[in-house]
Image: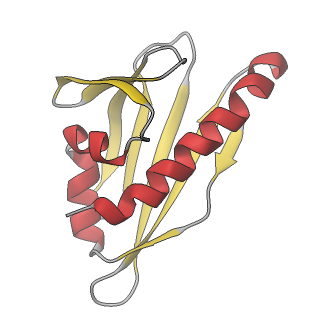
Amino acid sequence: MHIEVPKKRVAKTNKEVFDFLTDIKNFETLMPDNIDKFEVLDEKTFKFALKGMPEIVLRLKEQYPNEKVVLGAASDKLPFTLTGDIVPFGENESHVSLSFEGEFNAMMAMMIKTPITNFMETLSANMDKIP
């Protein structure tokens, strides 16, 4: 299953966005208002829960300086990745594209597609909160 949300224009350089996204404690800033729990487990891993949803543990899997950040599920039970592609745009701006990739059966994909899309749209919208 592949989900992509529209590109977000951010008033920060690609380096500023990359530095923000690779410091995983910063993801709390990007979370939706209905967050129930957010906990940093180590410098590369955090877990969160949205109201009415199970806990999800994400780990920083890959990073390409100032270009890309890849987070993945810490568990192999439901393998997926969340990728942020960062492209410089002008002097003090960049475009951030978020995409989700996961292997799910048809029933599971049908159940999670809308909540994941909404979650990613919120993460993207909240990129404006990067200090």
Q: Residue at x 16, y 31 (%)?
A: 43
Residue 91: quadrant of the picture: bottom left
Furthest residue toward right: 106
Whether residue 67 is visible: no
Rendered location of residue 115, percent (x, y): 64, 34
Furthest residue toward top: 77
How many numbered circles does the render carry? 0
Between 96 and 31, the residue placed more toward the observer is 31
Between 78 and 118, the residue placed more toward the observer is 118
Q: In the visual, does 102 lie left or right of 76?
A: right
Q: In the visual, does 7 lie left or right of 27?
A: right
Q: Residue at x 42, y 40 (%)?
A: 33
Q: In the rendered view, tell whether residue 33 sits above or below residue 78.
A: below
Whether residue 52 is visible: yes
Q: Residue at x 54, y 41 (%)?
A: 119
Rendered location of residue 9, percent (x, y): 45, 74
Rendered location of residue 118, percent (x, y): 61, 43
Q: In the rendered view, tell whether residue 16 sits above or below residue 102.
A: below
Rendered location of residue 15, percent (x, y): 23, 68
Q: In the rendered view, tell whether residue 121 sits above or below residue 42.
A: below
Between 29 and 5, the residue placed more toward the observer is 29
Position of the C terminus, as image quadrant, is bottom left
Q: Residue at x 67, y 45 (%)?
A: 3
Q: In the visual, does 47 lie left or right of 122?
A: left
Position of the N terminus, as image quadrant, is top right
Between 131 and 88, the residue placed more toward the observer is 131
Furthest residue toward left: 43
How are the colours assigned in the image?
Answer: secondary structure
